[in-house]
Image (cartoon, grey):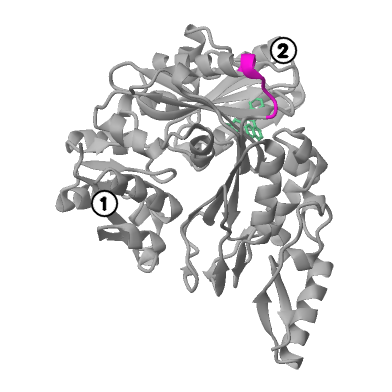
Amino acid sequence: MFKKILIANRGEIAIRVARACKELGISVVGVFSDADRDSYHLHYMDEALWIGDSSPQASYLNISKIIDVAKQAGAEAIHPGYGFLAENSNFAQACEESNIAFIGPNSKALSLVGDKVASRNTVQKVGVSIIPGMQGVGRDTKHFKEMANKVGYPVIVKASMGGGGKGMRVVYSEKELEASIAAGQREAKSAFGDASVYLEKYVEKPRHIEFQVLRDHHGNVVHLFERECSIQRRHQKIIEETPSPAIDEALRNEMGEAAKKVIEAAEYTNAGTVEFLLDGQRNYYFLEVNARVQVEHPITEMVTGVDLVRQQILIAAGKKISNKQKDFAQRGHAIEARIYAEDPENDFMPSPGRILYLNEASGPGIRVDSGIYQGWNVPPHYDPILSKLVVWAENREIAIRRISNALSNYVILGIKTNVGFLKRIMETKKFREGDYHTHFIDENESALIRQKEKIRNVLIAAALLASEKNSIMTQTGYATSAQVETTPWQELGGWEICKH
Ligand code: MV4
């Protein structure tokens, strides 16, 4: 087993990984940029090394610097977390060349799953269904036109080296096709340094369902069921839950087995996620492999009892997965809501700044994976995720009430957050019924965004009360989960102005 692991990340995920290391008796080396000198993740490290100035390029994306500090600290392995270098095959290769274990798949598997066209071909060979479309990259306009006519409009043009939604163009008719190809190529070139694009049938209003898979270096592979991730905005997931309200036992087993086949075909090791689209007729199609521990991994941990980060470390150290597929089961229901420093009323602009007051939710069945503390200044340089509120309950209905109450009790003052927005999603009829798809937020955005006027009036009233009566804000009760309509007062969390 490793004695020392370097965590090449920051924020809540760096803390999550540090916990798994400590529980294995492994010491942890943290890294930080100039912007992260006071960051919470450093409190969880046995030692911490500076890797560069505040820009991600100079620090958390700086391959040679991270390898250097890992060597300097004597770390035998690097955990990349998610984002930054987590799926970068050059980074995995640099680790391999330096004899440092990269806690993830090897560089060859990373290259394969990073190439969406190559992945489609690999997956098709093992008999897992892919969305009808091109086998390779598009050659010329004629090739695109022929394929579009074959699969029928609408179609979607995607970047071969893309993923996560960048470089995608939906095309509704032949007259838009040529311009969309050109635009897709330009975007792909600038985002991924590779202009190749391909075309497939566009699946309208699908659900996004992904399967968690683990595969060791001895050929053992298991899946840990699905996560439903359809509640997203501009390709950024917001709420995830498991089990998915959309699939039954038979379909779950079939998709889980398909996910394992994908991972085997790619000769992929460690933890990975196989993404599928599910259409309105319950047909599922392979979309892509995410080669990292994902932001939403805790919901799988809550219903299976498996510590995924611990498993990642054990697999990287060469250990065998000792359990068989039949040993795993889903128990109860888990939901995660991602808490961001952003302003839903202002087009979700990032809202960095000082956290003046923080009271994170707690209670039975509540887990908060957090990277923040009261008094900390959220820097503007990175992804604005602050923490993740995760709940477990016996069933979906209770889990929704539990997370709704927990959101009411989650108080962050000083910066704008999406907490109220998340709570309003939980209160919609469609979410409660489990009847939603990937366009849920787009279709309901205006209803989900608080009326500016209403909240402004409440804040003015609060300020007046506070100044005139020399009162302070005191935490008191909380909104009841039976409440479907929220008032701005409730969105302040369990607070009221009290005379002092
Ligand atoms: C699609 C699609 C519909 N049809 N492909 C978005 C991110 C990337 N992983 C692939 N994505 C999509 N590919 C076809 N042929 C719709 C999406 C999509 C989506 C997928 C998953 C989760 C959220 C999404 C939001 C919009 C579009």
Q: Which quarter of the figure has residue 200?
A: top right
Q: Decide: few, some or many residues near mark 2? Use Cα within 10 Å; few <14, some 14-19, many ≥20.
A: some
Query: Looking at the rendered structure, which numbered label has been put on residue 60?
Result: none
Residue stretch rendered in magenta on the structure: 245-251
Query: Looking at the rendered structure, which numbered label has been put on residue 28?
Result: 1
Q: Which quarter of the figure has residue 230?
A: top right
Q: Position of residue 405 (x, y in %)?
A: 68, 55
Q: Is residue 451 visible?
A: yes
Q: Which quarter of the figure has residue 243?
A: top right
Q: Quadrant of the N terminus?
A: top left
Residue at left 60%, top 34%? 332
Q: Position of residue 343 (x, y in %)?
A: 66, 61
In the displayed structure, would residue 210 be above or below residue 30?
A: above
Report the mark closest to the observer, 2 or 1: 1
Q: Quadrant of the C terminus?
A: bottom right
Q: Looking at this view, is 256 or 181 the one in front?
A: 256
Residue topped by disc 2: 149
Residue at left 62%, top 37%? 241
**Of the residues shown, which amino acid type is indicated by label 2?**
Asn
Please tell me whether residue 65 belongs to the stretch shown in magenta.
Answer: no
Local SS, label 1:
strand
State the count of labels: 2
Residue at left 74%, top 34%? 434
The alpha-carbon separation of the residues under discs 2 and 1 comes to: 55 Å
> Left or right of 431: which side holds 200?
left
Q: Looking at this view, is 148 or 411 the one in front?
A: 411
